[in-house]
Image: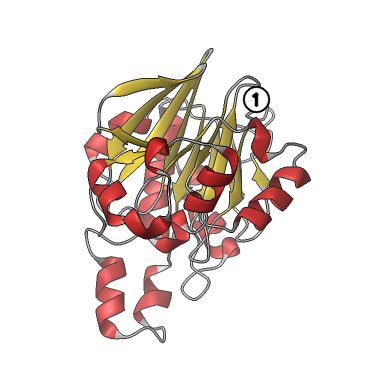
């Protein structure tokens, strides 16, 4: 199982499970809402093994402390991220430090963190490994680098940031300093960059793309989907046939769709 529970500026959380070990990436929602959404997909927090944090912004850690304490879950993050979220209420015994580019295991799932360019304290994305599966979460990035691409390349499925339409952002209501921040090298990935990355991933063997962290003000699911689908078609890769393409819902669980050439990521 690999899916998004929520995705956007109001909260981010995804789950990966091989049936033995279940890991949350980020916990940007309340414990009550997490319980509701896990119930919606037929599981519960009691099945969770750990929480992995990408960075300390509130839409990624809102419920991390309470959930960690209530269910005794270890919380994995870089030392700098843990220091930056020291007021999140994570019990000291559940604080676990990680290093980018170091592989480690949680239960039966292998994990590799990789550095991402975002305005946070040593933020990371994650790739997960079990059986023949490689799955990746790559959001909150100001730009796509070759280093990041090499880390997510070859993933069967990827949750990939497609935050904003550049023209919508430039012409929108945000103040100039915030526009500069989002468009900068440590802000968020645009639809254009997401589409280019998606095509490269598809050419490397990826079969399922979920576009995440869609801006409510500077993007729409339709625009994000169209940009990636159109570029894929221009490259001779057919959505729905050669790969599945979906958008993570802001408030509800979203599963990867099935493509005709490959099953859904489960």
Left or right: 25, with 187 as reference point? right
Query: Residue 31: x and y, percent?
Result: 61, 54
The residue located at (46%, 61%) in the rendering is: 59
Left or right: 39, with 244 as reference point? right
Query: Residue 103: x and y, percent?
Result: 32, 21
How many callouts does the rendering have?
Answer: 1
Whether residue 238 is visible here, answered yes or no, is no
Which one is in front, 72 or 19? Answer: 72
Which one is in front, 101 or 260? Answer: 101
Outermost residue to the top: 131
The residue located at (36%, 40%) in the rendering is: 125
The residue located at (25%, 74%) in the rendering is: 180
**Residue 30 occupies which quadrant of the picture?**
bottom right
Which one is in front, 96 or 191? Answer: 96
Looking at the image, is 212 positioned above or below residue 159?
below
The secondary structure type at the circle numbered 1 is: loop
Q: Quadrant of the C terminus?
A: top right
Q: Quadrant of the N terminus?
A: top right
Other-residue count near label 1 (Cα within 10 Å), few / some / many at <14 / 14–19 / ≥20 = few
Q: Which residue is mark 1?
A: 261
The residue located at (66%, 57%) in the rendering is: 33
Looking at the image, is 9 positioned above or below residue 151?
below
Q: How is the image coloured?
A: secondary structure
Query: Residue 108: x and y, percent?
Result: 52, 16
Which one is in front, 94 or 104? Answer: 94
Query: Residue 218: x and y, percent?
Result: 46, 73
Whether residue 75 is visible here, answered yes or no, is yes
Left or right: 46, with 106 as reference point? right
Left or right: 1, with 170 as reference point? right
């Amino acid at each position: 199982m690999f899916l998004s529970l929520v995705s956007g500026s109001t909260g981010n959380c995804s789950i990966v499970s091989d049936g033995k070990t279940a890991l949350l990436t980020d916990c940007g929602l309340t414990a009550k809402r997490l319980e509701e959404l896990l119930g919606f997909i037929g599981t519960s927090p009691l099945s969770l093994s750990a929480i992995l944090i990408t960075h300390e912004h509130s839409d990624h850690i809102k419920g991390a402390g309470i959930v960690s304490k209530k269910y005794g879950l270890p919380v994995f993050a870089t030392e700098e991220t843990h220091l930056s979220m020291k007021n999140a209420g994570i019990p000291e015994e559940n604080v676990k430090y990680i290093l980018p580019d170091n592989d480690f295991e949680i239960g039966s799932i292998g994990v590799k963190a990789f550095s991402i360019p975002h305005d946070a304290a040593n933020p990371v994305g994650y790739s997960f490994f079990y059986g023949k599966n490689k799955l990746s979460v790559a959001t909150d990035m100001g730009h796509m680098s070759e280093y990041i691409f090499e880390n997510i390349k070859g993933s069967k499925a990827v949750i990939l940031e497609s935050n904003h339409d550049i023209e919508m952002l430039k012409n929108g209501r945000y103040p100039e300093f915030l526009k500069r921040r989002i468009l900068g090298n440590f802000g968020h990935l645009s639809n254009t960059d997401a589409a280019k990355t998606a095509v490269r991933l598809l050419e490397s063997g990826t079969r399922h793309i979920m576009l995440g962290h869609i801006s409510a003000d500077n993007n729409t699911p339709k625009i994000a989907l169209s940009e990636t689908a159109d570029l894929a078609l221009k490259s001779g890769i057919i959505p729905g046939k050669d790969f599945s393409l979906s958008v993570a819902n802001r408030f509800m669980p979203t599963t990867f769709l099935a493509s005709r050439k490959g099953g859904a990521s489960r």
